[in-house]
Image (tube, grey):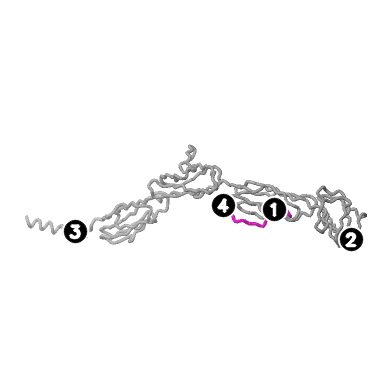
Amino acid sequence: MKNRFIVLALAANLLCLASSCAPEPMVSLSKSSFTGSSDAAEFSLDVTTTYDWVSSSSAGWVRLSPASGPKGITPVTVKVDANNTFDDRNATVTFSSEGVTSVLTVSQSQKNSLVVSKSNYHLSFESDTIDVQLMANVDYSYSVPDTATWVRAISTKGLKESHVLFQIDENTGFSIRETAITFTDKSKGLSTAVKIQQDPMIHFEMSVDSLVLAYDETAFVLNVTTNGAFQWNTSGCTWLDCSDEPSFTPGEMKEYALHFTAESNLLHEPREYTIPFVDANKVKYKLYVRQEAAPYILVTVASGRTVTAPVVKETSDDAVIDWGDGLREAYALGLTHTYADEGPHTITITSAQASRVNLGSLRGIDRMDFRLF
């Protein structure tokens, strides 16, 4: 019986030698799947085969090193690129050896995104509504600071979930106010903010809104109290000017002193101009300026101790004559004056209105100046 077993064993060995005793093809992986976040990743696995092997990846974002190898146990490094898309993605890596395959599955999460279409809102002081549009692939919530009671969310059935309406109350104060609405995904991984800045209600006050100036060159100061910038325009007036260029501080209540100069009015008619002002909210104001007419002035030079005043017709009730020696009195036809010496003496007649001078009645007059008559 023992000899029989020996014979059978020898026969089996001879048969194995005849067929080269080839092993069955086999591919074994130490890891068959990998699931990662959107970040780049790297991991290792062992590939065990009975013959040489090769690999192929279904996606370029999964790379192997080495990508092929000999039979036996081969350590392999798998590199996964960062997922910059906004969707989950999957790939397979197939290991093949002599017609036998084994598959590694790689899964990667989406890149989470929470983006607002507009991150800054600068609003006027008036009540308003803002529509914040979001692009998100996560569930999110929003929060408004408790101190910002002037900002409230509004729900509207017609809006999509990616829109949130906020009611902004009117700013009745005189200072700029600001806040931020924070949008956060519910997993607390992402957040973004929308900043809101609201201009103050504009206060604008002028110290006067109308002025009456004398006919001669006059300087005056206009005080403007406001919490915003403003503009004025005197380009349409040739006799009125302001050279000031104040430095504005928006949101801060300040008083600005504007220095104006009116040239002498050498005409015998009054003139006027309305200076337009525009505040920071484009509200218009006016400063009315009137300048009186120049009076009729006749200057004469006379000699002699007793002098008769020139005859000026149709003078006004406020006409005066200055005899040039300290005496000044109301003008009247036929006035005479006695000096302490022979002169010459300068005589000035001023009248708000006059028509002509009677040259035929002049006595003792050396010279007459009609430039302001």
Q: Nearer the viewer, mark 3 or mark 4?
A: 4
Disc 2, SS:
loop
Q: Nearer the viewer, mark 2 or mark 1?
A: 2
What whole-number distance in Å separates the C-alpha atoms at marks 2 and 4?
69 Å
212 sits to left or right of 155? right
What whole-number distance in Å separates the C-alpha atoms at marks 3 and 4?
99 Å
For the point 46% across and 45% down, the residue is: 147
Which residue lies under the disc numbered 2?
304
Numbered mark located on residue 250 in the image: 4
Q: Nearer the viewer, residue 129 or 205?
A: 205
Disc 1, SS:
loop
Residue span colored magenta: 233-252
What whole-number distance in Å separates the C-alpha atoms at marks 3 and 1?
115 Å
Q: Quadrant of the C terminus?
A: bottom right
Which residue lies under the disc numbered 1?
234
Tag 3 and tag 4, C-beta contact below 8 Å: no
Q: Nearer the viewer, mark 2 or mark 3?
A: 2
Tag 4 and tag 1, C-beta contact below 8 Å: no
Marked residue nearer the N-terminal end (2 or 4): 4
Question: Can the viewer see residue 116?
Answer: no
Residue 99 % position (x, y) = 30, 54
Q: Nearer the viewer, residue 244 or 116?
A: 244
Neighbour class for label 4 at 10 Å: few (<14), some, many (≥20)? some
For the point 53% across and 49% down, the residue is: 176
Numbered mark located on residue 16 in the image: 3
The amino acid marked with disc number 2 is Gly
What whole-number distance in Å separates the C-alpha atoms at marks 2 and 3?
164 Å
